[in-house]
Image: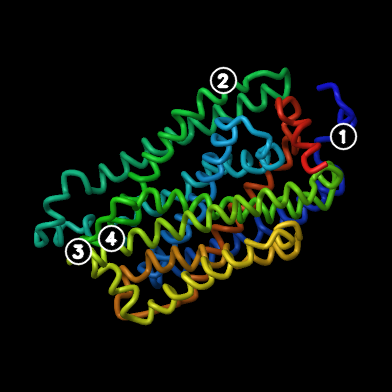
């Protein structure tokens, strides 16, 4: 690339590498310690452990897969809007092998999580017996292997060709050609996977918008997460001299879009079920709205939609790092609350319940995921060196 930015050291500066080390070591240590504590807790309260584990897995798996999808969207649109965040998103996508390991306890604990994995219930319940040829432990694990294989191939090719682009340029058309069918595969596999892992928690619950709802949730999580990451990276070189308020503003607008998209899908699902008087599906909402779980539902409406929506309408806020990160922090917390609202009422149907494992397990998994993310991030240049739109992205807002 021939430009005035040839001298910019795109590799992490020594100061940034030290910052990353200060995140990696405590995250890994805390993750290992908390994992041991959570495993001990699993022997005393296996039900609480597996239910907390499933909720945690859905969050971190969604962040990994959503990052891969946003990378493909960047290649497909061929715009400069994703250049600054591409390396961080690729690093997040490369945590997929860790997510595959995270899935193993779910595969081993199907009988603790799902009614359809309990042979006695299958024989007594018509719905479970009808589904059994599809919803059985063997097919459940087999489908998961297929999902992870598809995601693994996409992640491998995206990262390999991106590395080769750094070395000798080109590959943009090849990456775009992969991303078009890749996004289609992403939507289909996420739909089937979340039906298997989350929708099947309730025997009589059906939602034709379930997959799209999780796609929107993952996009919301990714843009919230990437704003936090860019805020940390922009404190040091090489991004300190090139990451501008205009880039932050763009990320804020994309976050606002995801907030509205999530709200649209969530409200559409409720509207169709409630106004259609769909008696098989309404109990799913009754367990979450007619009990003390309803307070979490209200919090989702107010704190995950109304407050971020109103705040993100402000142009100055989207260009202010501290203010935008404050909104992002709210959204990340509420993403955890939403997944708890989806998963836990299926088990604790009388009302809200919180145990120490519901805090320990998510933190353990999160610390290990963050450690893997930081490890991936520090091993490659923080900007795609030979990306066609790199110079345009660097001059954005001037």
Residue at the image position 55 percent from the left and 30 percent from the top: 76
Q: Earlier in the sequence, mark 3 or mark 4?
A: 4
Q: Quadrant of the C terminus?
A: top right
- Specify few, some or many for label 3: CA neighbours under 10 Å numbering under 14, 14-19, or 20 or more: few
Report the Cα–Cα distance between label 4 and label 2: 41 Å
Q: Secondary structure at mark 2?
A: helix
State yes or no: discs 1 and 2 in contact (Cβ < 8 Å): no
- First in sequence, mark 1 or 3: give its number: 1
Q: Nearer the viewer, mark 4 or mark 2?
A: 4
Q: Nearer the viewer, mark 1 or mark 3?
A: 3
Local crowd size for mark 4, using a 10 Å CA cut-off: few (<14), some (14–19), many (≥20) = few
Tell me what residue is drawn at x 75 percent, y 38 percent: 382
Q: Which mark is residue 174?
A: 2
User: Which of 223/271 is in front?
Assistant: 271
Q: Nearer the viewer, residue 36 or 145?
A: 145
Q: Residues within 10 Å of mark 1 (few under 14, many from 20)?
A: few
The answer to whether marks 2 and 3 mark residues whose Cβ atoms lie closer than 8 Å is: no
Horizontal and vertical percent position of residue 228: 68, 56
Task: Using the rendered view, name the quadrant where residue 47 is placed.
Answer: bottom left
C-alpha separation, residue under disc 1 versus residue under disc 2: 27 Å
For this view, does 333 lie left or right of residue 386? left
* Corner quadrant of residue 126: bottom left
Question: Dot 2, how many residues are within 10 Å of its Cα: few (below 14), some (14-19), or many (20+)?
Answer: few
Mark sitting earlier along the chain (2/3) = 2
Dot placed on the residue nearer the N-terminal end, 4 or 2: 2
Q: Is residue 163 above or below residue 278?
A: above
- The tag on residue 272 is 4
| Residue matched to label 1 | 8
Q: Nearer the viewer, mark 3 or mark 4?
A: 4
Do the CB atoms of the residues marked 3 and 4 lie less than 8 Å apart?
yes
């Amino acid at each position: 690339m021939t430009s005035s930015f040839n001298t910019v050291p795109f590799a992490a500066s020594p100061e940034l590498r030290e910052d990353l080390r200060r995140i990696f070591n405590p995250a890994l240590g805390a993750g290992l310690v908390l994992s041991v504590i959570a495993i001990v807790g699993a022997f005393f309260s296996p039900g609480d452990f597996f239910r907390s584990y499933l909720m945690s897995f859905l969050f971190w798996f969604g962040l990994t897969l959503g990052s891969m999808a946003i990378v493909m969207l960047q290649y497909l649109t061929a715009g400069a809007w994703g250049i600054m965040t591409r390396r961080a998103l690729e690093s997040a996508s490369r945590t997929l092998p860790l997510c595959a390991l995270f899935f193993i306890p779910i595969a081993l604990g199907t009988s603790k999580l799902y009614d359809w994995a309990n042979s006695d219930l299958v024989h007594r319940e018509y719905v479970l017996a009808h589904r059994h040829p599809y919803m059985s432990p063997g097919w459940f694990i087999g489908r998961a292997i297929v999902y992870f294989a598809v995601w693994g191939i996409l992640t491998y090719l995206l990262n390999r060709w991106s590395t080769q682009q750094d070395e000798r340029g080109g590959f943009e058309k090849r990456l775009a050609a992969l991303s078009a069918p890749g996004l289609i595969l992403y939507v289909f596999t996420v739909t089937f996977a979340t039906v298997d892992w989350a929708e099947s928690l309730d025997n009589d619950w059906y939602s034709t918008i379930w997959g799209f709802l999780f796609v929107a949730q993952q996009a919301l999580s990714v843009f919230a997460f990437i704003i936090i990451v860019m805020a940390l990276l922009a404190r040091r070189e090489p991004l300190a001299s090139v990451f501008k308020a205009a880039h932050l503003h763009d990320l804020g607008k994309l976050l606002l879009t995801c907030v509205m998209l999530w709200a649209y899908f969530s409200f559409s699902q409720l509207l169709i079920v409630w106004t259609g008087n769909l008696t098989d599906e309404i109990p799913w909402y009754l367990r979450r709205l007619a009990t003390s779980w309803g307070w979490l539902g209200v919090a989702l409406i107010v704190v995950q939609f109304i407050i971020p929506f109103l705040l993100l309408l402000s142009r100055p806020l989207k260009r202010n790092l501290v203010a935008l990160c404050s909104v992002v922090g709210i959204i990340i917390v509420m993403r955890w609350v939403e997944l708890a609202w989806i998963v836990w009422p299926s088990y604790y149907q009388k009302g809200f319940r919180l145990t120490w494992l519901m805090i320990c397990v998510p933190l353990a998994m999160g610390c290990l995921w963050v450690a893997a993310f930081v490890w991936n991030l520090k091993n490659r240049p923080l900007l795609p060196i030979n990306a066609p739109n790199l110079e345009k992205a660097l001059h954005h807002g001037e």
